Amino acid sequence: MKSFDEYVALAEQAHGHMCAGQILGLRMAVHGMHLLGIEDPTGRDRKRLVTFVEIDRCATDAIPIVTGCRMGKRALKFRDFGKVAATFCDLREDRAVRVAAKESSKQRARELYPEIEDRNAQQMRAYREMPEEELFDIQWVRVRLGPEDMPGYKSARVTCAECGEGINFKREVVRDGRILCRGCAGDRYYEPL
Ligand SMILES: [Zn+2]
Ligand SMILES: [Zn+2]
């Protein structure tokens, strides 16, 4: 593991600015690694880890800085729950821990540094220093990961009978005997014009 200051510098570079959310994300990931006993997530242990994130905000950008888990490697999974939380799955030991930011941490930051008026600066300072028990709730959990969810999974690509686009990783659905992509099956986030 790198020093926290090194992580901060790398996160700032990747994210474009430093902010309280990033500090929280870095601490969350470091805590997750400690809980799982993973010492070298971006090196020796890089194939051991899959991370789920639950929000598309600053904290999420910081997490791969520590874990090395990236979406393009299928090691970072996004579930849009709107929560500042992440689940770190150790594939080798077959165990997972979910780390969630406590609602009380903002209030705690106000109590610790009332003299810092800027909220972001106040929280950045406090989130660096607060003990993990004050920042996070943790929960050991089971995450069901099929072979098709794993990094490195190889699958035959199938073609959607409706739109003709290729579908990877068994994400197709069968509707009335036809193979469809999730979009054509009705699970669409866009409307064709
Ligand atoms: Zn930010
Ligand atoms: Zn389709």
Image: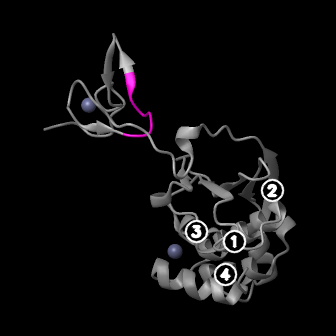
Label 4 vs 2, first from the N-terminus? 4
Q: How many marks?
A: 4
Alpha carbon distance from label 4 to label 3: 19 Å
Alpha carbon distance from label 4 to label 2: 19 Å
Q: Position of residue 69 (x, y in %)?
A: 58, 63
CA neighbours of label 4 inside 10 A, class few (<14), some (14 to 19), many (20+): some
Q: Which residues are magenta?
A: 168-173
Say which of 57 and 63 sits in front.
63
Q: Which residue is mark 1?
A: 44
Identify which amino acid the numbered label 2 is placed on: Asp
Label 1 sits on a secondary structure element that is: loop
Q: Which residue is mark 3?
A: 64
Alpha carbon distance from label 1 to label 2: 28 Å
Q: Name the residue rendered at 51%, 46% in the picture.
A: 153
Label 4 sits on a secondary structure element that is: helix
Label 3 sits on a secondary structure element that is: helix
The label nearer to you, 1 versus 4, is 1
The label nearer to you, 4 versus 2, is 2
Horizontal relation, residue 48 to residue 150: left or right: right
- Is 86 magenta? The answer is no
Label 1 vs 3, first from the N-terminus? 1
Label 4 vs 3, first from the N-terminus? 3
Label 3 vs 2, first from the N-terminus? 3
Which secondary structure dominates the residues rendered in magenta?
loop
Q: Which mark is residue 137?
A: 2
Alpha carbon distance from label 3 to label 2: 20 Å
Where 87 sits versus 158, above or below?
below
Q: Do the residues bearing badges 4 and 3 touch, measured as CB atoms within 8 Å? A: no
